[in-house]
Amino acid sequence: MNNSTSAPTISFASDNWAGAHPEVLEAIAAANAGHAPAYGGDPWTARFQRLARTLFGDDAEAFPVLSGTGANVLALQAALPRWGAVICAGTAHIHTDETGAPEKTGGLKLLPVEAPGGKLTPELVAREAWGWGNEHRAEPLAVSITQSTELGTCYTPDEIRALADQAHEHGMVLHLDGSRLGNAAASLGVSLGELTSGAGVDLLSLGGTKNGLLGAEAVVVLRPGSAPGLPYLRKMNLQLASKMRFVSAQLLALYEGDLWVRSASHANAMAARLATGLEELATAGAVPGLRIAHPVEVNSVFATLPADVADRVRSRFAFGARPTDPGLYRLMCAFDTQPEHVDALLAAIAEG
């Protein structure tokens, strides 16, 4: 029986749409050998723990989990008391795309701040960094940033350090949602540690699924004591995998060698190719109203398109719309996006 669907085979909707990387599947198969202790008592998880310390410093402690939302909720819930609040950008994934999970499941108050380009600054954080000791207001006790941001921009190490210094001055922790940390590091030409522990980040949600893994992420505690009770909360929040070796084996496949940077660099390069093609179409006036809305720094391109062009092209290629910004679309490349895929999309846009 043919179980194929009618979904487009080439997608620019999200890097989440891509399959698992072949090297990751090989790692899963290699881990599928005999019996191994459950719940993280296996050799793969121990090896990933050692790797985390290599990548992020001797104080790092890693907790493999099953989803990015689970990682974010778990990290923030462990870091804050019940009366705690989290300052984040208005575009932050924890605010716009997690169905209120940090608030409903984590019991946390979010304090969103409108941030140009999706990036917080100390000045923007200061708008909500007040009210400590006031029993009538949820206390701001964490700042959460996304790397790369939801608008495809990147924080530099210096920008993160400035936020960390401000957070620590006020007794807050700095959490980094690193769902696309690899794309940012590849774009900036720095290590994963330089963007996290080296810049003062306390808690990291380490992404994997968007860079070729099969439902594998991790919470990494970078500063000891910043997330007490995390092992217990991981179980409570349904993020403790019984057969954790298969989660850890994937994280090892991605981060132990250079797969993370190879995959991220390729996805970034495909987005740059797409952006160049769109700019050429816009300059030539081939598609009235076409423009790139945000700097293209990683593997996503935000572009405005006429509705009729977008509707026609989306019948062949999936890509995302921005409900709050009519006419603005996100076109995202993945580790398996090929130059011919990008060129076919550009040709389809130019037809209009």
Image (cartoon, helix red, strand yellow):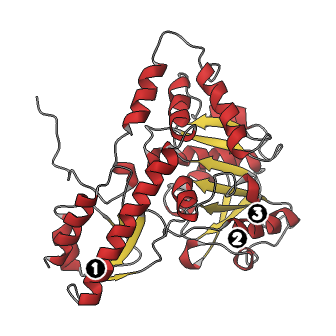
Residue, disc 1: 305
Label 1 sits on what residue type?
Answer: Leu
At horizontal 56% and vertical 30% (from top left) the residue drawn is 248
Residue, disc 2: 159
**On screen, residue 153 above or below 192:** below
Where is residue 24 drawn, in percent x and y?
43, 34
Q: Quick check: marks 2 and 3 in contact, CB under 8 Å?
A: no
Label 2 sits on what residue type?
Answer: Glu
Disc with the residue nearer the chain's start (2 vs 1): 2
Disc with the residue nearer the chain's start (1 vs 3): 3
- Secondary element under disc 1, as helix, strand or loop, is loop
Alpha carbon separation for disc pair 1 and 3 = 41 Å
Residue 346's label in the rendered image is none
At horizontal 56% and vertical 51% (from top left) the residue drawn is 101
Q: Nearer the viewer, mark 2 or mark 1?
A: 2
Alpha carbon separation for disc pair 2 and 3 = 26 Å
Residue, disc 3: 138
At horizontal 53% and vertical 22% (from top left) the residue drawn is 243
Whether residue 257 is visible to the viewer of this picture, yes or no, is yes
At horizontal 52% and vertical 31% (from top left) the residue drawn is 247
Label 1 neighbour load within 10 Å: few <14, some 14-19, many 20+: many
Where is residue 93 drawn, in percent x and y?
53, 60
Q: Within the image, what quadrant is residue 168 found in?
A: bottom right
Q: Quick check: marks 2 and 1 in contact, CB under 8 Å?
A: no
